[in-house]
Amino acid sequence: MPWRRVTRGPVGSGCGRCSSGAGCAGAWHDRALVLAEASPEPKARKWRASLWNNVGWSRFERGDHPGALEAFETALAARRERGEAKETRIAEWCVGRALRALGRVEEALAIQQRLVAAWHAAGAEDEYVEEELGECLLALGRAAAARPHLARAAERLAADAWLAEHEPERIARLQRLAAGR
């Protein structure tokens, strides 16, 4: 999914002048957040979720998992406020990912299980949810239960030309784990 690609860029200098920790780009995020949060204009406020998501990934990438969770939860609230079903599921995924990074794996697993059901109810699947569900199960020592999720994730991620080119190790790892190796 293209939305995941944007989260993979370099974090920046971590200048410390902004809450995201993403250097000068983070300062712009902070400035945009102040404007979006204070604005009565729906067109300005709609940016809140995207901006908070970006702040969350900047924090996550620099290892500030509690800060990332806080930003992702804020982004999730903004998505729910707008009633954006697909985007809300993506924001929930981010919350679950941060929870797993914090060692709160049971909570993360519950989120990913709900997301699998929600995607299926919408007549779709999401390879990133399958991957994260598999990772949660692995973290809980449930490798056999993780395998089908990891296999689905590996198959779908391998079909993404960008990921196949830029993250072949990730796909190979998922394939190994899915095969029980």
Image: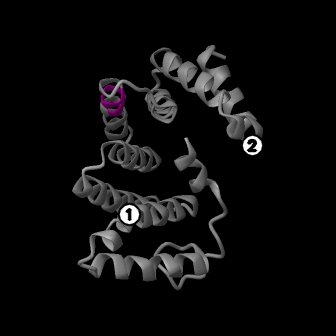
Looking at the rendered structure, the kind of residue marked 1 is Ala
Q: Quadrant of the C terminus?
A: top right
Residue that numbered label 2 is attached to = 166
Q: Nearer the viewer, residue 102 or 28?
A: 28
Q: Residue at x 66, y 27 (%)?
A: 159
Does any portion of residue 146 appear in the rendered image? yes
Q: Which mark is residue 71?
A: 1
Residue 90 locus on image (x, y percent): 40, 45
Residue 54 locus on image (x, y percent): 49, 63
Q: Which residues are magenta?
A: 115-119
Q: Quadrant of the N terminus?
A: top right
Q: Residue at x 24, y 50 (%)?
A: 83
Left or right of 114 in this view: 57 = right
Magenta highlight: main SS: helix
Q: CA distance from mark 1 to mark 2?
A: 27 Å
Looking at the rendered structure, the kind of residue marked 2 is His
Determine whether 16 is above or below 148 in the image: below
Determine whether 174 is above or below 11 in the image: above
Q: Residues within 10 Å of mark 1 (few under 14, many from 20)?
A: many
Q: Nearer the viewer, residue 177 or 45?
A: 45
